[in-house]
Image (cartoon, rainbow, N blue to C red):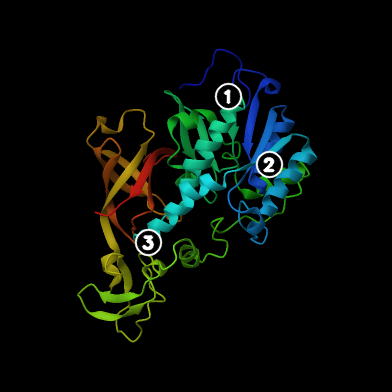
Amino acid sequence: MALDNTGPLNSLGLPKPPAETRVIVAMSGGVDSSVVAAMLHEEGYDVVGITLQLYDHGAALAKKGACCAGRDIHDARRVAEARGFAHYVLDYENAFRDAVIDEFADSYLAGATPVPCIRCNERVKFHDLLETAKDLDADCMATGHYIQRKAGATGAELHMAADPVRDQSYFLFSTTQAQLDYLRFPLGHLENKDATRRLAQHYGLSVADKPDSQDICFVPDGDYAKVIEKLRPGAAEPGEVVHADGRVLGHHPGVIHFTIGQRRGLGIGGLEEPLYVVRLDPETRRVVVGPRAMLATRRVPIREVNWLGDAPLQSRSEWPLSVKLRSTRPPREAVLRPTGPDSGEVELIAPEEGVSPGQACVFYEPEGTRVFGGGWITRG
């Protein structure tokens, strides 16, 4: 859907005055979404803040640094009260468990390395919450994500944030065109996080100096294995640590404690060559290790492709792109070859190490900022 340019557009690209434009702001309780809500309210928009309760509120109170904890719900409510706009807390605990937490646990048990924040955006925030926003007759939904939405020749386009350090495009690759038409990202153009905090201070927000959350919200201490064992009792079954050449080198407490590319904590000291986890075999409960050279790969099969190009994915046999295989790594030159309506194979021009099933492969315009979607890395 292309933007309607028949009348004068407000700052959100909609052809109506701000006072007649209802905006749902997804408020996590952090500084980013709080600034978005305060900024749009000051511009005269009809702002409604919504915070999602994603897991047990009582348990969450003790989890500092988690994005959806009880303290964060309280902080979001305080911002809304201070600025004078409506705010609601919605219980999405069951939806979050079904759509995100269960798959997280099952993926780890299957030897993959999942990215639950992407699934949360895809299945909860940009699906369930977005539908709620429409039910409330909102004209659009705004979030505090660092990514840019720009008007293109055929509709809204997704672009990397102006600040490469804060860019969150990797976590938003599964945003569909229909969702993108409805979403707004008012912070994507800012030069850095300091600019956001200055805005928070300008609006007098109590969260202006609040630290950023660092962990997955339901794994506040970073101990994934402990969470999985709680969700799937008996999941941590011991097994063998095996060299790629077949030698049994030791034993491990459970496949869920390891990820592709891991070097430390293998429990196989005393060997001359440094060894890395090169494969996880949950069926045989084996952790396979080998030299670093075995981590390099050039061909990456992907599934569940979300394509944001102007032409259909299968309209060409191959697409020259840049791709990100991990959120912390820069884009790499590659070629995407579609193998179906939502599947393909990415060939990297230069090998990449530590590519793991369950991670995302995100597509970018070569030498540009536009995001062309992405897919999930699967086993070859």
Q: What residue would you read off at disc 1?
A: 13
CA distance separating discs 2 and 3: 39 Å
Q: Residue at x 53, y 31 (%)?
A: 131
CA distance separating discs 1 and 2: 19 Å
Q: What residue would you read off at disc 3?
A: 109
The image quadrant that residue 279 belongs to is: bottom left
Amino acid at circle 3: Leu
Amino acid at circle 2: Val
Q: Are marks 3 and 1 in contact (CB under 8 Å)?
A: no
Disc 3 or 1, which lies upstream in sequence? 1
CA distance separating discs 3 and 1: 45 Å
Q: Residues within 10 Å of mark 3 (few under 14, many from 20)?
A: many
Q: Position of residue 73 (x, y in %)?
A: 68, 48
Q: Is residue 85 left or right of residue 327?
A: right
Q: Residue at x 48, y 64 (%)?
A: 224
Q: Which mark is on residue 304?
A: none
Q: Residue at x 53, y 29 (%)?
A: 182
